[in-house]
Image: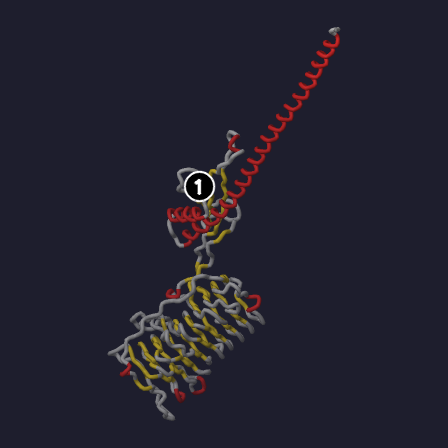
Amino acid sequence: MSPWPVRELHGASLKGDRVRLVRDEKGQSLVVVAVFLGIVGVGFMAFALDVGSLFRQKRMAQAAADAAAVAAAKEVSVGNSATNEQAMANAVARLNGFDTTLSSNAATVTLSTPMTGNFKGTGYVQATVTRPIPTIFLATFPGRSSAVAVSATAIAGGSSSPTCVCIESPSAEDLFIVNGAQLKAPNCGVVDDSNASNAVYITGGSSLSGLSLGTVSTTWNNSSNINNGGSISGSTTIVTGITSTCAPAMPAAPAYNVANCLTDPGNNGSSSIPAFTAGPSSSTSTICYNGLTIGPNSTVDTLNPGIYVINGNYLHFERGDGVHSNYGGNGVFFYLTNGAALQIDNGANVNLVAGGNTTSTGGTASSVGSGYDGILLYQDTSDNGQMTVAGGSSVFMNGALFAPAAQMIFSNGSGTTIEGGIVCTQLIMTGGSVINANADVSEGSLTLTTPKLVQ
C-alpha cells in the first residue's frame, strides 16, 4: 500500500489542528473581554454606589448643619456661652445622624461667625458639619478624599421690644381700632395672644404705631384686616406666629376687711351732695367702698392718695356740670373685686395718676407703696366686668390698667389719653380715643427676630 494516502491524512490532521487552535484562541479572547467587562461593570456599580452614598450623606449632613446652626443661634439669642452653643449644635447634629463622639468616622461640627456674604457679623452663626464617608470605588484611588462637608447659616436673633399692651384672649378679634382711634406705643409693643385670622383689625382712619406688633396667629395678615384708611406704622415690626404669649404676673390683692367697706357716698339718692375729699385717712393707706361714684350731680371731687378697694358695683366717674369738672386724684391705686367694674361716662373730666408717675402738670405723684406704684387700676383675675371709658373733653390716666379677664373699651373723644401699660382680654378703641402706651417691665418683651436659617 502506498504511503501517500497516509501522508495526506497526516497533513489533513495537522491542518485541522491549526484550525482548532485558531478557534480556541478566539474563545480565549471572549473570556478576556467578558472578564474585563465584568470588572468595568463592577467598577461602575461601585462608583454608582459611592456617588449615591455621598449624595445621601450630603443631604443628611445639610439637615444636620441646618439644625446645628439654629440650635447654636438660639443659645446666642438668650446670651448663653460659646460652650453651650457648641454643646447644643453637637447634640442636634447627633440627632440627625452625625455623632461627634464616635471612635471611628466621627462627625465634626464647627461653629463660626461668617465674615463675608450677605449674612455676616455677630448676629449670625455658621455651622459646618463634616464626616468621613466609607466608599468602595473611590477608596482605591490614593489621595482621593471620601468625606462630606456642608455648611448652614442662621440668624441669632435676640433683638426685642418691651411689651406695653398685652391682649390675653386665645381666640377672636382681640384688638379692634376704628373711627379715628390711635394706639401709640413709641417705646414698646403690642402682643395679641389670639390665634384668629382677624386677631387685629384697624379701619376708618385709625392707626397703630409702636416698636412692634406680635400675634400668636399665623394666618393674620394686614392686607385683609387693615383697610379703609386704617394703618400700621411702617416702623412697627410685625411678628406673626409667636410661640410665647403674654401673661404677666398680676400684683397681690391689698389686704382689707369686707365688713369695714363703706357705702358709696355718691350714690345715696340725694338730689344734691356737696363736693367731698374721699380716700384713706392719715392713719391708713387703704379704704374700701361697696361701689364708688365720683362727680355725681355736677360735683367736683378729689381723691386722696392711697389704695382704694372697690368691692362690687362700679368705680363710676360721672359727667360733671358743663363738662368743666376736674375730678380724680394723684398717687392712687384702685383694686376692683367681687364683680366691680370701671365706668367713665361720656363727657367726664377725669384726671388719675398712679403712685410715682408724672402728673398732668408735670409734678410727681406721691408713692402708694405696697408694690402698687405705677399701677392705676387692677381688676381681680376672677372678674370680667367690662372696663368702659366713654370719652370726654379731658380724660387723662397715667398708670398701668390691668384687667386680665375683662374687655376694655375706649370711645368717643379725642381728649381721652391713657399713658401706661394695658392688660385685658380684648381692647376696643373707637371715636378718636388715644392711648399712649408706655413700657411696662412686668409685661415682658417680644423677640423681634427669632433664630432661623438664612442660608
Q: Is residue 423 left or right of residue 119?
A: left
Using the image as rendered, state which of residue 321 and residue 141 is in the foreground: 141
**Res 398 seen here:** no
Q: Secondary structure at mark 1?
A: loop
Which residue appears at 72% of the width and 14% of the height? 12
Q: Residues within 10 Å of mark 1 (few under 14, many from 20)?
A: many
Which residue appears at 53% of the width and 30% of the height? 141
**On screen, 302 above or below 240?**
below
Q: Is residue 350 left or right of residue 35?
A: left
Which residue appears at 52% of the width and 43% of the height? 56
Please tell me in which quadrant of the rendered image residue 106 appears. top left
**Res 352 seen here:** yes
Q: What residue occupies the far top of the structure in this picture?
A: 2
Q: What residue occupies the far bottom of the structure in this picture?
A: 271
Q: Position of residue 147 (x, y in %)?
A: 49, 38
Q: Which quadrant does the N terminus fall into? A: top right
Mark 1 = which residue? Answer: 107
Q: Is residue 191 left or right of residue 366?
A: right
Q: Position of residue 215 (x, y in %)?
A: 48, 65
Q: Position of residue 96 (x, y in %)?
A: 46, 48
Using the image as rendered, state which of residue 402 and residue 339 is in the foreground: 339
Q: Position of residue 169 (x, y in %)?
A: 44, 70
| Residue type beneath disc 1 | Ala
Which residue appears at 47% of the width and 57% of the height? 449
Using the image as rendered, state which of residue 80 and residue 7 is in the foreground: 7
Q: What residue occupies the far front of the structure in this picture?
A: 1
Using the image as rendered, state which of residue 171 and residue 407 is in the foreground: 171
